[in-house]
Structure formats: C-alpha cells, structure tokens
Amino acid sequence: MRFDFTDKRVLVTGGTRGIGRATAEAFLEAGARVAVNGRTPASTSSAIAALGSGARLVSAPGDVATASGCKAIVDAAIEGLGGLDMLVNSAGVGDSGPIEEIDEAFWDEMLAVNLKGTFFCIRWALGALRESKGNIVNVASDAGLMGDVGSGTVYCASKGGVVNMTRAMALELAPDVRVNCVCPGYVDTDMVRRDGIDRAADPLAAERALIDYAPLKRIAAPSEIATSILYMASDDARFVTGAAFQIDGGSTAGQ
Ligand SMILES: NC(=O)c1ccc[n+]([C@@H]2O[C@H](COP(=O)([O-])OP(=O)(O)OC[C@H]3O[C@@H](n4cnc5c(N)ncnc54)[C@H](O)[C@@H]3O)[C@@H](O)[C@H]2O)c1
C-alpha cells in the first residue's frame, strides 16, 4: 500500500464514474471510509455496490449544481462518516462548441457544476474540515492552466476558475486547511471516450488526436489521477497548499 488513510473520512463528489470512482476506490484500498456522491440516489447506490458495498462506504447523493444540493451531499457525508477529513471535488461536466453556438443554459450549467459546485461543497464542508485540520483536492484540468480549443472556451473558463479559486482558498484557509488541485490532461473516462471519441465522425482519428495532444503520447488512466489526488491529500504533502499539480503527459509544459 502506497498511502495509509486508515479510518480517514473522505467525501468524493462525482464518485460514481471516471476519476472520482477511481479515487474512491484508491481511498478505500488505503483504509479510508468514503462517502460517494452521485447525482441521483440510484447512480450512487450502483456505484457503492460496484465498490463492494462495505461498511466503510456511505451514500451521499445530490446535485452539485445548486448550493442546496451541495449542502445535502456534504451533510449526508458528515453524518454518515461522523465528520470529515478530506474532500475531493471531482464532479464535473465537459462539453465544447464554437462560441457562436453557446447559449446561456450551456454556460450556466457548466459554471454551476464545475465552479459553483466546487465552491459550495467546500463552503459547507469547511466547519468539519477546520475541526479535523483536513484538506481539499479539487479536480481542475490542464484546460484550467491554458486555452484548449478542444475542451472549449466555457470549460476552460470554469476550470481556470477552479485553479485560481484553489489558490485563493489556500491562502484564506492556511494554516488550518490545505487546498490543492490536480490538473489532468486527457483521461480515459466517459467524458472523453463515450461523450467525445465515440461520438466523433471518425472515432479512430479523434482518439489519435487526443493521444498526440500530450508529449508523452497517450491518454491517462483514471487511476493515475487518483494516485496523485491521494498524494495531495496525504501527510506526505503536508507542506503543499495552493498547488495546481499537472498530470498531463507534458501538455502544459510548452510547445
Ligand atoms: N476525463 C478527462 O480527460 C478530464 C481531464 C481533466 C479534468 N477532468 C475533470 O475530472 C473530473 C471528473 O471527470 P471524469 O473524466 O471522471 O468524467 P465522468 O463523466 O466519467 O465523471 C463525471 C462525474 O461527475 C458527476 N457529475 C456530473 N454532474 C454532476 C452534478 N451536477 N452533480 C453531481 N455529480 C455530477 C457524474 O455523475 C460523474 O460521476 C471532472 O471535473 C472533469 O472536468 C477530466
């Protein structure tokens, strides 16, 4: 075992799929008790069943797109776990399109899920995290550190917001609560494969383009991002706050 989170209490939003699910799995393997959030009770229950339905799992369903949804999620986690040591904000939506085709509903949904949801989950979790001297890891993106036409302008805006909000919160909450974010490049999840590659006119070419995007010439596995999230949340990272950790195969290193 690389990390020991025995009896630590962790909430993972968007824990039903992709990076969030891999993170929930990794925390469980490392001994933590994990509250899993999915948008609906049904998706949360089936993720919990897939994770083994053990006594160390707590259900925290709810929609992060509203402040009240975030409160319900965080309250369920704190009640089920008896407090909170770590919050991982992984719930997110990705979509792109030319600026001329973006309407207000598209903008509002992406900013509500990716940015407002991250803020309000932290807002409601803060009392418990201050008590435990816990920490927060936000899942941002390489598209929060640079413009990326493929990811889209609105997604870049939302993830840029997550990166800089992470820094501002790290300053405000130091020295009690550490706040960091990870900035993945393309990762093999539903967001990229089901909603991107598989829907492209030429899926093979679309996959090749994403592989070529990173200097290391591949798409990451969700478990690779999870490992970095566990590092950020661990005591090994006790001098790390306000960091935006790129796990992107070199995509933000330059041209
Ligand atoms: N896949 C990538 O290439 C990639 C790259 C960089 C960053 N990210 C970020 O990683 C995070 C996880 O994405 P993923 O790739 O695992 O995608 P995914 O689509 O597999 O998972 C997204 C998760 O977020 C949840 N979610 C979406 N809207 C929600 C809402 N309103 N309320 C509650 N939960 C909601 C989904 O149910 C799901 O569990 C996102 O924030 C995404 O922006 C992904």
Image (cartoon, grey):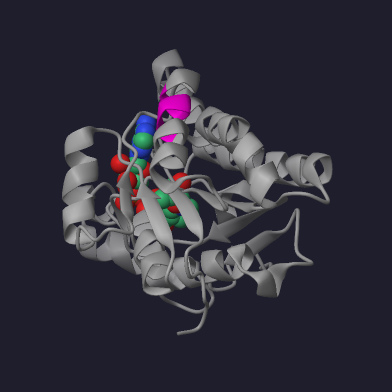
Q: Quadrant of the N terminus?
A: bottom left
Q: Nearer the viewer, residue 30 or 183?
A: 30
Which residue is most to the bottom?
1
**Can you tell which quarter of the image residue 128 is in?**
top right
Give the residue drawn at x 26%, y 57%. 193
Residue 32 falls within the magenta-colored stretch = no
Horizontal side of 207 relative to 179 (left or right) equals: left
Horizontal side of 70 relative to 163 (left or right) equals: left
Asked whether residue 98 is in view, the answer is no
Give the residue drawn at x 39%, y 55%. 34
Which residue is most to the front?
82
Q: Nearer the viewer, residue 105 or 45?
A: 45
Which residue is most to the top?
104
Residue 72 falls within the magenta-colored stretch = yes
Horizontal side of 254 relative to 187 (left or right) equals: right
Question: Which span is picked out in magenta?
Answer: 69-73
Q: Is residue 79 above or below residue 49?
A: above
Percent x, y for residue 244?
Answer: 68, 57
Q: Nearer the viewer, residue 55 or 187?
A: 55
Q: Quadrant of the C terminus?
A: bottom right
**Can you tell which quarter of the image residue 247 is in?**
bottom right
Tell me how many marks there are.
Answer: 0
Asked whether residue 28 is in view, the answer is yes
Percent x, y for residue 197?
Answer: 26, 55
The chief SS type of the magenta part is helix
Give the residue drawn at x 30%, y 59%. 206
Percent x, y for residue 121?
Answer: 53, 34
Give the residue drawn at x 58%, y 58%. 183
Percent x, y for residue 80?
Answer: 38, 42
